[in-house]
Amino acid sequence: MLAERLAKSLPGAAVFLCRGQLRKTMQRCWHEYDALVCIMASGIVVRTLAPLIKDKRKDPAVVVCDEHGQFAVSLLSGHLGGANALAGRVAAITGGRAVITTASDVQGRTALDLWAQDLGLVVADRDGLSRAMGKLVNQGSVMLSSDYPLPQLPEDMRLH
């Protein structure tokens, strides 16, 4: 069974079989775990979790897999929540393919939110970050201004 195979390969994972209790089980898991791997149709996951979705910075990562493990789709909280990375791990375990749709990943650009997190920086202006990400993916680079010394910048970032 795919769920058991994933649970053995993902530290801290638990398997829940939802026979007739899907909504209740998924709601409980949403509040108790920082990531969910759902082996079912994405439409079921979307409809079940929709009322619970609040904030991509706080919601758990959600990855959806088909029953054969051919596709591991990063559905929610891709960057900061870790769903993109988790989809990659799941695909590596199953021999399938990670499906990542975030523009920065698709284009091979720096994910500014992850870059900031990796440096221990706090993003004070979330809207500004979204605008900067838009520029990065649409124009190929972004200018950065900082009063503090930074390590070498990724190729798609320039210091102002």
Image (cartoon, rainbow, N blue to C red):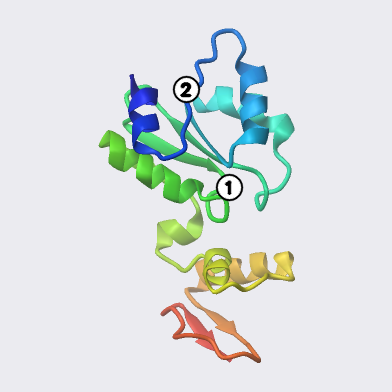
Are there few (<14), some (14-19), or many (20+) residues within 10 Å of tag 1? many
Q: Give the number of the disc on residue 105.
A: none
Residue 39 in the figure: left or right of residue 20? left
Q: Residue at x 25, y 37 (%)?
A: 95
Which residue, as the protein is rendered here, is positioned at the far front? 12
In-front residue for pair 78/121: 121
Q: Can residue 100 be seen in this view?
A: no
Q: Say which amino acid is labelled 1.
A: Ser
Callout 1 secondary element: loop
Q: How far apart are marks 1 and 2 (CA)?
A: 18 Å
Q: Say which amino acid is labelled 2.
A: Met
Q: Name the residue under label 1.
A: 77
Callout 2 secondary element: loop
- Residue 126 position, x and y percent, is 71, 65
Q: Mark 2 points at which residue?
A: 40
Quadrant of the image containing the N terminus: top left
Among numbered discs 1 and 2, the one appearing first in the sequence: 2
Which residue, as the protein is rendered here, is positioned at the far left? 95
- Residue 134 sits above or below residue 100 on the image: below
- Residue 6 position, x and y percent, is 37, 31
In-front residue for pair 107/54: 54
Q: How many marks?
A: 2
- Residue 90 sits above or below residue 137 on the image: above
Residue 112 in the figure: left or right of residue 108? right
- Residue 37 position, x and y percent, is 48, 33
Q: Residue at x 42, y 43 (%)?
A: 87
Q: Check whether the beta carbons of the residues at disc 1 and disc 2 lie within 8 A of each other.
A: no
Q: Can residue 63 be seen in this view?
A: yes
Q: Residue at x 68, y 49 (%)?
A: 58
- Residue 9 position, x and y percent, is 34, 36
Q: Which residue is drawn at 44% across and 38% down?
A: 73
